[in-house]
Amino acid sequence: MFCPECGSKNEDNAVFCNNCGMRLQEAGIENPSAPKKREPLTSGDKILLAELGVAILSVIIFIVVYNMQYSAKNIAEKHVKAFFEEDWNTVYDTMYVDGADDFMDKEAFVTAQQINETGEKQHVAVMSVNKISGGFSSRAYHVVYRTEDYSDTMTVEMKRKGLLWKVDDSDIYIIKNYTVSVPAGAKVSVDKIDVSKSVKPSEKLEGYDTYVIPKVFGMTHYVELSGEELESSGQLHTGYNNGNAEEDLPDSIIKTGYNEETIEKVMKQAESDIEEILNAASENKRFSEVSVFEDVYAKNKEYVIDGYEYLRDSVFGNGNSKYTLTKYQITNGEMNGSLPDYYEDSVVKVDIKGNYSYANAYIYWDGDIERDDGEGTCSHSLYYINDGGTWKLYDMEMDMGGVY
C-alpha cells in the first residue's frame, strides 16, 4: 500500500509508514486486494434462517403427505374400503355431496345408512387402483379388490371439490322427492330433523299435510309426529315414488294415535251424530238434507251414502210401501273410542252399543195391518278423521240388531 502522507510504498499489512512513520490504519486506507472480514450472524439472523428452513421443510412434508393421503388415487382406495366395511363416516368424508342442508349433512347420511344397512360388513383388500381417464377436474379409476369370499373390480368416478378429490357416487344413496303425509297440523321430524320448519306442506291428500323433501339419503327413515291432539309417536317409514312427488301418495301416509282427551271429544260428536242419522232415516230425509253428511270425507263419501240409503229405505221401510219401522229407540247405550289399525288412514272409531226397542207395521195386500214390537241389542260404529281440527265422518256401520 502507499502512504497517504509521503507517498512511499509499504507492505500490504504495514501498520506504520516505513518512511515517515504515518499510522496507516488510522488513515482508514485499506488494501483492495486484502480479504474482507465477514460480519458474524446475530441471534435474530440465526432464528430467521431456522424458521425459513422449517417452513421449507413443512411445505415439502405437506406436499408428500397430501399426495399420500388426499390424491385422487388414495381417496378412491379409501372410499372402496370404507364402503365394504360400512364405515359410513369415512364414506361420507370421501364422497362428493352437492348440497348443504340438514338432510345432506354427515349426521343425516350416517343415520340413514345405519337404518338401511344389511349388517354384512366385509373386510376388503384393495389390490390395485389404476387411472383410466380424466384430467384436472374429474377422473376415473379402475379398482381391483378382494373380500374374504371373492374378488372383483369396480370403476370409481372422481370429481374435484376445491383442492380435494371426492368420489362422485352420491346419487346411489340419494332418494329424490321423499314424501310423508301426516295429519293436518301435526309437527313432523324425519331422522330428528324438524321438517315442519324447513319444508312447506301441500294438501295433496284430504286431511293431511304432505311434505316433499327434495333429496334424502336412503329409502327408510325414522319419522316422529307430535301435536296438540296427538299421542307423540315414532316409526320407521319406507317411501319411494320413483322421484315423482305426485305418485303413490297413499304410501306416504304416516299413521298416528290420538290422546284420550281428543277421543272423548270425538265420542261426544258421535253421540249427537248417531241420533241425527237415525232420526233422518226414520223421517225419510235425503242424504243432502242431513247436516252430519255435509262434510263427509270425500274418499269414502259414496260408501257413506250407500249405507245411509240402505238404512233409510230398507231398515226403516221408506222404500217399501208395505213395511214401516214406526219406532226404534236405543236404551242403556255404551260408547267406546278406539284407533283401528285396518284403515290406511289415522281414524278414530266410536262404537255405540246398547239395548233397543222397536215397533213396526206390515200392510198386507188385502189391507190388513200386522203390527210387531220387540227389543234386542244393537251395535253401531262411526269413524272419524281429523282434517285440520275438524272431525269429518269417515265411514259408518249400522247394525240394527236384526230389525230388517
Image (cartoon, rainbow, N blue to C red):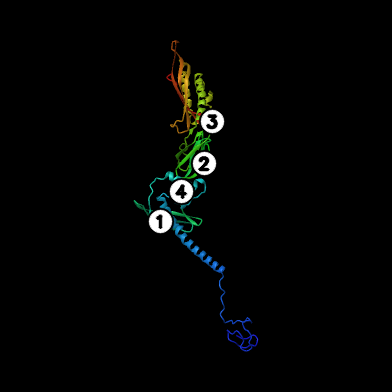
Which numbered disc flags the more N-terminal residue, 4 or 3? Answer: 4
Badge 3: how crowded within 10 Å, few (<14), some, or many (20+)?
few
The residue wearing badge 3 is 390
Which numbered disc flags the more N-terminal residue, 3 or 2? Answer: 2
The residue wearing badge 1 is 142
Which numbered disc flags the more N-terminal residue, 1 or 4? Answer: 1
The residue wearing badge 4 is 171
Q: CA distance from mark 4 to mark 3?
A: 41 Å
Badge 1: how crowded within 10 Å, few (<14), some, or many (20+)?
some
Instruction: Identify the amino acid type marked 1.
Output: His
The residue wearing badge 2 is 195
Q: CA distance from mark 1 to mark 3?
A: 60 Å
Residue 238 position, x and y percent, is 44, 40
Q: CA distance from mark 3 to mark 2?
A: 23 Å
Which numbered disc flags the more N-terminal residue, 4 or 2? Answer: 4
Q: CA distance from mark 1 to mark 4?
A: 19 Å
- Tags 1 and 4 touching, CB below 8 Å: no
Relative to 25, say whether 354 is above or below. Answer: above
Tell me the quadrant of the picture where the C terminus can be found.
top left
Instruction: Identify the amino acid type marked 2.
Output: Val
